[in-house]
């Protein structure tokens, strides 16, 4: 699962300069790819009986729900926000801005 920001969702006034500070307002952290289960990398197991396509689809959906429940926690979102803030801050400082204030939409 990849959590992060989608820069296609920024508002028109997402970045401004306020005296000597760059003010950045980023979109909220979200799941970037809904198709995060890679069936090619899953472990195969043998089971007796037959599985219909509907059964397989149901198992996949249950796995997706369980992984989202475990992965989309406030702690993980906060960690992604901290990482995005650090990355944007580093980018802006490398462009010559000394002060930056980064926040996220709710």
Image (cartoon, helix red, strand yellow):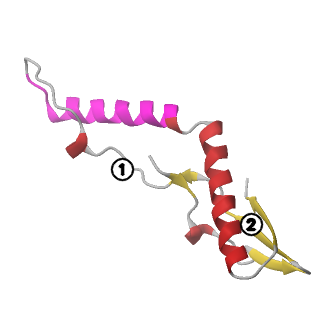
Asked which quadrant contains residue 78, the reply is: top right
Q: Nearer the viewer, residue 74 or 20?
A: 20
Disc 2 and disc 1: Cα gap in Å?
Answer: 27 Å
Q: Nearer the viewer, residue 22 or 30?
A: 22
Q: Position of residue 37 (x, y in %)?
A: 33, 43
Outermost residue toward the top in this view: 48
Q: Residues within 10 Å of mark 1 (few under 14, many from 20)?
A: few
Q: Secondary structure at mark 2?
A: strand
Q: Which residues are magenta?
A: 50-70
Q: Residue at x 36, y 30 (%)?
A: 62
Q: Between disc 2 and disc 1, whose residue precedes? A: 2
Outermost residue toward the right in this view: 19
The residue labelled by disc 2 is 25
Give left or right: position of 86 versus 40.
right
Magenta region includes residue 51: yes
Q: Position of residue 21 (x, y in %)?
A: 86, 75
The residue labelled by disc 1 is 35
């Amino acid at each position: 699962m990849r959590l992060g920001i989608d820069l296609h969702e920024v508002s028109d006034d997402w970045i401004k300069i306020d005296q000597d500070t760059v003010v950045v307002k980023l979109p909220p952290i979200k799941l970037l790819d809904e198709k995060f289960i890679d069936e090619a990398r899953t472990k195969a197991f043998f089971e007796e009986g037959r599985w219909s396509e509907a059964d397989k689809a149901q198992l996949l959906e249950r796995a997706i729900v369980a992984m989202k429940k475990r992965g989309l926690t406030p702690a993980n979102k906060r960690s992604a926000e901290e990482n995005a803030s650090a990355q944007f801050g580093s980018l802006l400082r490398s462009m010559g801005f000394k002060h930056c204030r980064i926040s996220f939409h709710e």
